[in-house]
Amino acid sequence: MPMIDLLGVRGDGPTALAECDVCIVGTGPAGATLAQELSATRLRVTVLESGDGERSEPADRLNDIENVGRPRVPDQWSVRNRIVGGSSHTWGGRCAPFDEIDYQQRSWVPGSGWPFGPEEMEPYLDRTTSHLGLAVGTGFSDESFWSIAGRTPPAARADPSLLRSFFWQFSRDEEESYPFEYVRFGRSLARRLGPDVTLVTGATVLRVLPSEPGDAVSAVEYVAPDGHRRTLRTGTVVLATGGIENARILLSSDSTSPAGLGNDHDQVGRYLMDHPRGPVGSFDVAASHELLKRLGRYNVRGHLFRAGLRLSPEVQQAEGLLNCAAWLGEELGPDDPWDALRRFIQRKPALPADALALAKGVPLFVRGLRDYFVDRNGIPRRFQAVTLLAMVEQRPDPESRITLGERRDAFGIRLPRVDWRIHPDEVRTMRRTAEIVGQQLVAMGFPAPTPAAWVLEGGDLPASFVDVAHPTGTTRMSVDPRQGVVDSDGQVHGVRGLYVTGSSVFPTVGHCNPTQMIVAMAIRLADHLKAKAVPVTTLTTRGGPVPARRAEPATVLVTGGTGRIGQVVVADLLERGYLVRCTTSRASLPEPVPGLEWRSVDFMTAAAGDYDDLVHGCSAVLHLAAEIGKQDRMPTVNGLATRLLAGAAERAGVEAFVYTSTVSVYGSGRARTMTEDAPTLTVEDDVPGEYLAMDYVRTYGRTKLAGERAISEVAERTRYTVLRPTVVVDEQGLAAIQDWSRSKRVLAAHRHAHHVYVRDVSDALVWAMERSLRGSGEAGSGEAGSVETFNVSEDHLAAPTHAAFLRKAFDATGDPRFKVPVVPGAVDWLHDIVRFRQPTLRNPLWRMRFPADKLAEAGFRARYGMRRAEAGALELLRQQHRPPLVDRPDDLVLVSAGQRDGT
């Protein structure tokens, strides 16, 4: 990633400062995520950051505001960070998705309602895990948490018609020495960006410059610390500078409209919301131990979650309340040993106080070991106060707003005038939340909180309830341009190519911290921009330049087109406008459709000339066809046929060849984590001890690996990608668990399912193909004859076991077939050793993990995720519910990425 610090640049500087395909303004969670998602797409992206790598006083002063509303935090650094990484420098790491009610249009909340519902956001929330260091992206904030955590739900629960459980998840940066450090986007940004992304620091954007009619973006004007102004030409600008600055830049962009860009209906800056937050009660510290365990922190595989309570949708509607949540606030004592330990780890101890705190904290450390490793809770701390905190959403109010003041900053730009308002609805909701939580805690067997004085007296919020760095709504989404600033894609109404991302586009603020939603919205916008934008680049190979965009549709050969994956891939390619030539081993060909040509081919008997005819005129080959069941056919179909097809592709000048392999090539590894460079099976000889599996499964893995090796030996001019999916499933495949024998369900329930959704595998295939056709810009990736290998999985997600899905299926249908005991994994392992007569220290596949980190680093992001597949499967089960079938013996095997297509 090129990086330019304007402190050291004279004049207009490098060409990267003159023109780009996409300009991103800001490097906070929204801007940094968007830049990472657009990396490795061959779009020329320039990221402009006003700050530098370190905090500076001149940059801080650019955050000055004129406050004319409710008092705000005096030190803006605590809520707004003008620095690489933005406000992730001071955030608290709390993440959660919005509730379903937050998206709805509520009659008692004027201005509520999003242009889409929670189902639209789920796949993007799932993709936030790698950006925020989360264990899971969705499904953890309600009672589903107990399943994810592998815990039995507590018996004492609140009345669900009044309160619902809520869980927040804390970000974790696994690269930091302190195990609970939050992700700070500035630390890893340079490493996560590819060569087509240029980061410019010390670049303060003054205004967006539209085309002459004012209906499209043409450039942005920005200024260096020395006052030198520059113009960056671009057709796409994304403002990602926060709820205050996004509105300020639009209002300041007045070259064609005195009111500012996107402000034809006087909507820019309106509907400013934040989160009124503060104590509504307090507890006796000495009597709070059990309460702190129940509503405290939980450790799930090294990731911390915090439990709390939120108002139910029923009570919100019945009493006209806003959404609100409550949790325990713990005030650490000055002698907390864990804080002292952290300072020692960071080599910044306060001596001798920290040494004394460590010595006195030995009993707490001992208790902490049990709490953390055995009970899997958060570590116990030494508190001097325990309070009941509440945080409430705000009613959207057009008079709570950002405008431009009369004072100007160092570069002559008018300061934002902030008129933030709090309403009786928020105050009433917080008081009512305190009352309900107090009553329900007593009913659950816990001590009641002592209500705060303002709650008892029915007064207004204390002055200490100031903004909490969550400015929201000032460029809100709307279908009607008269009701907001951006459309559902984040594009400013009436200004083509101008986008806004971040919490400023939220129509409502919900009750929870906005960062995970901000990152999810940035991922969603990135997908939109990747689908919409066309880079003007070429790929240079040994055979000469290859244009990134063709005048006519490219023809793609898909082998195995009638298989589980093939059917989805063919549909995806046709939808994208490709011409498709498709093979099947079936004697009768499917009905023809426009753009799709069928060929009947048996790769067991096909001659060399047949392969040349297949690839003639094709720009790319997606090789999915494979033999799964018949061992005698596997060497020819999976190995030799792959070699012959790749050879024909080389002779025909095919640019991209994607081969669908399988994680079965790893066999039963000695290690539990199988990255792409892990040891694989022996191809030349069948070594039963390498794989605890049926003979045909082991042969399948060996012959698919033979196909991989054939590609490496043939590769010369074509660019190859090898994908190794885990267990590829669709909705019908997931629902088929109802037909398993009872013994199979019981024995396999504990197993890691290794499922990956067929639609995401299809997307990965098309992504890899398009990446090869245009080149990714990474070192060596544009060279002809290269071979890249990627795992395709969702193995990073928490507890994707068969048991987890069985529980969901039972809840959905009540069918007793789905209610099975879970045997310990050791029993299953011993069963396999006896079954295959292979005593070994190797891991069965259900113990192994196949991370897709390399694929994510290359730029691929799954659009759907297994949550989408499971939702569809559960709906099928509801519709197809029938009496239990007669148990029958069956074998459980792990075979992936092939299609029973007869090939």
Image: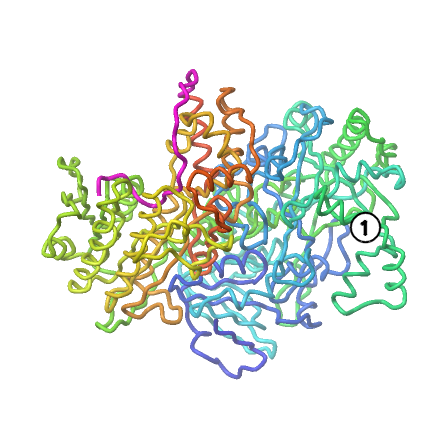
**Magenta part of the chain:** 880-903
What secondary structure predominates along the stretch shown in magenta? loop
Looking at the image, which residue is at 25% across and 51% down? 638
Q: Is residue 462 magenta?
A: no
Identify the element where label 1 is drawn: helix
Residue 633 versus residue 727: which sits nearer the camera? 633
* Amino acid at the residue labelled 1: Val
Q: Is residue 678 above or below residue 153?
A: below
Residue 376 is at least partly visible in this image: yes
Residue 487 is at least partly visible in this image: no
Residue 378 versus residue 892: which sits nearer the camera? 892
The residue where tag 1 is placed is 366
Q: Quadrant of residue 291?
A: top right
Q: Is residue 463 above or below residue 736?
A: below
Q: Is residue 899 above or below residue 60?
A: above
Left or right? Give the position of 688 relative to 623.
right
For this orientation, the residue located farthest to the bottom is 10
Left or right? Give the position of 490 relative to 564.
right
Looking at the image, which residue is at 46% across and 60% down? 857
Left or right? Give the position of 172 relative to 71.
left
Q: Quadrant of residue 20?
A: bottom left
